[in-house]
Amino acid sequence: MDFTIRPSQKEDMPQVLKLIQELAVFEKEDNVVEVTVSDLERSGFGPEKHFHCFVAENEDVVVGMALVYPRYSTWKGPIIHLEDLIVTENMRGSGLGTALLNEVVKYGRNLGVKRISWEVLDWNEPAIDFYKSKGADVKRDWDVVHLDEKGIANYLVNI
């Protein structure tokens, strides 16, 4: 299948949101996505850019995306975080995931980052195998910690 990888544009955000929702269904979290097209447009293309996104197109339809943002490691220095790499179901196995990851790695190298990091669900063995095949070190001994909006509010009440 033919596809093109390019930096996203503001006009891509409705299709990007559809991919995010597709991923949420795949990860059994269908009702958790709160971000809107407006949020994505503002955060990715407003005065303060919070992320960089690559999209993959096939016949003028966005069929994959990779969204990254800057972080800082106290041990390493500047890094980027790959929030999501999504390939729509009918395009999986086409090489699209590799092409998107290639763009992320080239982007990170061009920025001079010391590391690219991301998470993967422990039950998503195809993704784990894919990342390992690309040389990624899947750290099974680290737990991800989140403090959501409610948790933040509760925390602040108690200080």
Image (spheres, helix red, strand yellow):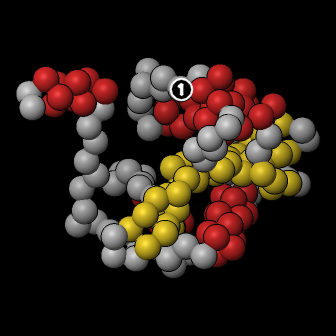
Local crowd at mark 1 within 10 Å, few (<14), some, or many (≥20)? few
Residue at the (8%, 27%) spot, across then down? 158
Would residue 53 be visible to someone looking at this image?
yes
**Taking 120 as reference, is 38 above or below it?**
above
Q: Tell me which corner region of the image, top left, top right, bottom left or bottom right, holds residue 20.
A: top right
Residue 13 percent coordinates (x, y): 72, 32
Q: Tell me which corner region of the image, top left, top right, bottom left or bottom right, holds residue 149.
A: top left
How many labels were placed on the picture? 1
Residue 67 percent coordinates (x, y): 61, 49
Residue at the (50%, 30%) spot, across then down? 25
Residue lying at the far left of the rendered structure:
158
**Residue 1 or residue 6, whichever sits in front:** 6
**Taking 133 as reference, is 90 above or below it?**
above
In-image side of 67 versus 45 (left or right): left
Residue at the (63%, 44%) spot, across then down? 49
Please identify the quadrant where the N terminus is shown: bottom right
Residue lying at the far right of the rendered structure:
59
Residue at the (53%, 26%) spot, across then down? 35
**Residue 70 or residue 85, whichever sits in front:** 70
In-image side of 155 versus 147 (left or right): left
User: In terms of secondary structure, where does tag 1 sit?
Assistant: loop
Would residue 132 be visible to someone looking at this image?
no
Residue 121 percent coordinates (x, y): 38, 51
**Taking 10 as reference, is 118 above or below it?**
below
| Residue on which disc 1 sits | 35
In-image side of 39 versus 110 (left or right): left
Please identify the quadrant where the C terminus is shown: top left
Residue 140 percent coordinates (x, y): 28, 66
Give the residue type that dot 1 points to: Val
